[in-house]
Image: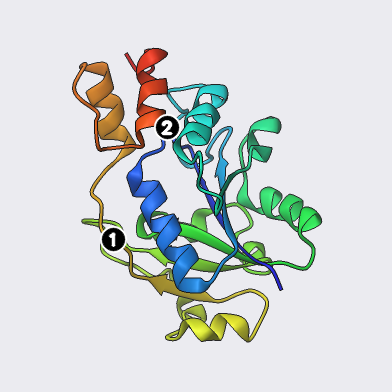
Amino acid sequence: MQRIGLLGGTFDPVHFGHLRPAVEVRAALGLEQIRLIPAQVSPLRSAPGATGAHRIAMLRAAIQGADDLVVDGRELEREGPSYTIDTLEHVRRDFPDARLHLLMGADAFADFERWHRWAEILEHVHIVVTHRPGRPLRVPSGLAGSVVADAAALEAVPAGRVWIQAVTQLDISATRIRAAAAAGRDLRFLMPAAARRYLEEHRLYE
């Protein structure tokens, strides 16, 4: 059975705080790949500072040579808000027999019950929550009974469980990168070099 991880976000821009947890989750859970899915418009966030074309180009530059990471542009091909449930239904058509794992940080997980048709999301995926620096883990009340204490429990059922995965804590944020870019500050070692060069060459966020 194929095991696939899904990591959505604006990736505005992509940085090591996105990528390092993704590869650690992939290794810890034995996933074949992590699909990185940039949002067209995130329903719970302000509009991205860079266009979808620029954000997906930075993502592709960032993961060049990493065969276990895949850029998935399906949300950028849809108009309107990028609701996760719509994306999952679309992914399921492409991978009907795969076991899907939806990755998210603790901050997104805390607001999960605000997501569009959130209960239906659990019918499609297991949720993998990664700790974020400075963000205490809060389990939404509707998901408390879904949290498992052993990752092996994710194999017992096709979807509906929540696993908390420890990952390397990298206190990097896209907000601070955008502010640094606007101020002309040095962005080295915050994001993959190829993505940083793309950002600088196209004068994004200035």
Snapshot colouring:
rainbow
Residue depicted at x 42% and y 13%: 202
Residue 13 vertical placement versus 173 (above, below): above
Residue depicted at x 25% and y 33%: 176
Residue depicted at x 39% and y 17%: 204
Residue 145 vertical placement versus 167 (above, below): below
Rate crowding at label 1 as few (under 14), some (14 to 19) or many (20 or more) other CA atoms within 10 Å.
few
Residue 37 vertical placement versus 203 (above, below): below
Q: Quadrant of residue 106?
A: bottom left
The answer to whether residue 147 is left or right of residue 36 is left
Q: Amino acid at mark 1?
A: Thr
Q: Quadrant of residue 82?
A: top right
Quarter of the image that includes the N terminus:
bottom right
Q: CA distance from mark 1 to mark 2?
A: 21 Å
The answer to whether residue 129 is left or right of residue 72 is left
Q: Secondary structure at mark 2?
A: loop
Instruction: Determine which of the numbered discs, if any, sits on residue 168 in the image.
Output: 1
Instruction: Determine which of the numbered discs, if any, sits on residue 12 in the image.
Output: 2
Q: Secondary structure at mark 1?
A: loop
Query: Can residue 142 be seen by looking at this rendering?
Result: no
Residue depicted at x 24% and y 56%: 133
Q: Amino acid at mark 2?
A: Asp
Residue 51 vertical placement versus 149 (above, below): above
Quarter of the image that includes the C terminus:
top left
Rate crowding at label 2 as few (under 14), some (14 to 19) or many (20 or more) other CA atoms within 10 Å.
many
Instruction: Determine which of the numbered discs, if any, sits on residue 74 in the image.
Output: none
The answer to whether residue 172 is left or right of residue 54 is left
x and y, in percent, of residue 192 in the image: 36, 37
x and y, in percent, of residue 130 in the image: 38, 63
